[in-house]
Amino acid sequence: MDVVAQLWPIGPWAPKDQNMDKGYHESRIKYHEERLKYHEERLRYHRSMVAKKEKNSGIEASVTKEALAAGRKVRILFVDLSNTCRSPAAEQTMKTLLKNDGLSSYFEVSSCSTGSGTNNWFKPEVSSNIEVEASDPRMVSHASRRGLNLAGRQSKVMTKEDLQRADLVVIMDNANRVEVQAAASYWGLRGSVDDKVKRLTEYCRSGTMTTDIPDPYYGGRGMQPSGQVFEKVLDLIEVQTGDDAEIY
């Protein structure tokens, strides 16, 4: 027998009877079946850990512990440009989640606008003239399919009291942050506000790549149908608020 066959007796160089050894191959099959079983168990474990990590996310999971410790209602304020699409949908989604989990008594949830693009909207003489709007009928329609009732709701412009009272101010995009900061500076609240202003996407679960909740009013970018944009916005809102979040 040559040196290679002595060192590694299984292979094309090995004698025919060794290559055809049924007992050897059966033992290797058993070995690999056991290893496969082990790795399948590890795969199930790691998948369960990823799922648990994903569930421990979203605003609901993030602030519930704070609410239970505060001894009072935690006030969450959702903010967007006009308070006719994204922020009222986020408000109603959050209220529904809290109700389903029996946590409504620990939170006060509301929403408002940053003046619908009106310059200096935060000044009393300006805000008093901003027209009140009903929720966008397209958002009302798409939200209703998910059990969210936005019918009959009217927009509200943020006030100084709203910003003062809120424990958490949840914005939809960076433009909202700029407007909230401008209002806070005018009202003399800037130092006490910055830390509590958060983008909704900061509460995202793993796999969510977007940094903003896009405004669906004009139908999104390019030729994307507006209905698809509204559905996408609602999907993002559900993910960030914690549609299946585990409360701890």
Image (tube, grey):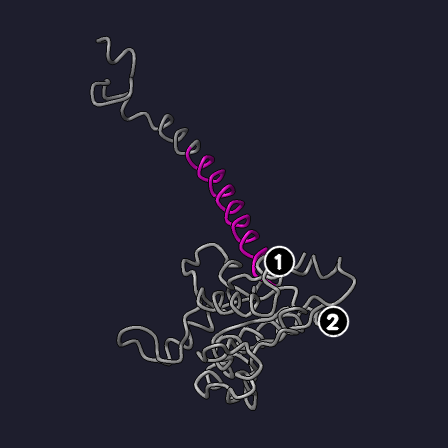
Taking depth in this image into account, of 76 and 33 the one nearest to the observer is 76
Taking depth in this image into account, of 156 and 240 the one nearest to the observer is 156
Q: Secondary structure at mark 1?
A: helix
Q: Distance from label 2 to label 1 (Cα)?
A: 17 Å
For residue 143, above or below residue 202: below
- Per the rendered image, the range of residues in magenta is 32-59
Taking depth in this image into account, of 25 and 79 the one nearest to the observer is 79
Alpha-carbon neighbours of circle 2 within 10 Å: few (<14), some, or many (≥20)?
Answer: few
User: In the shown orientation, is residue 165 left or right of residue 71?
Assistant: left
Quarter occupied by the C terminus: bottom right
Quarter occupied by the N terminus: top left
The amino acid type of the residue labelled 1 equals Ser
Q: Secondary structure at mark 2?
A: helix
Circle nearer the N terminus (2, 1): 1
Residue 243, position as x, y percentages in the image: 56, 66
Residue 7, position as x, y percentages in the image: 29, 12
Q: To which residue does mark 1 refer? A: 62
Can residue 229 be found in the magenta stretch?
no
Q: Which mark is residue 105?
A: 2
Residue 156, position as x, y percentages in the image: 57, 82
User: In the shown orientation, is residue 188 left or right of residue 71?
Assistant: left
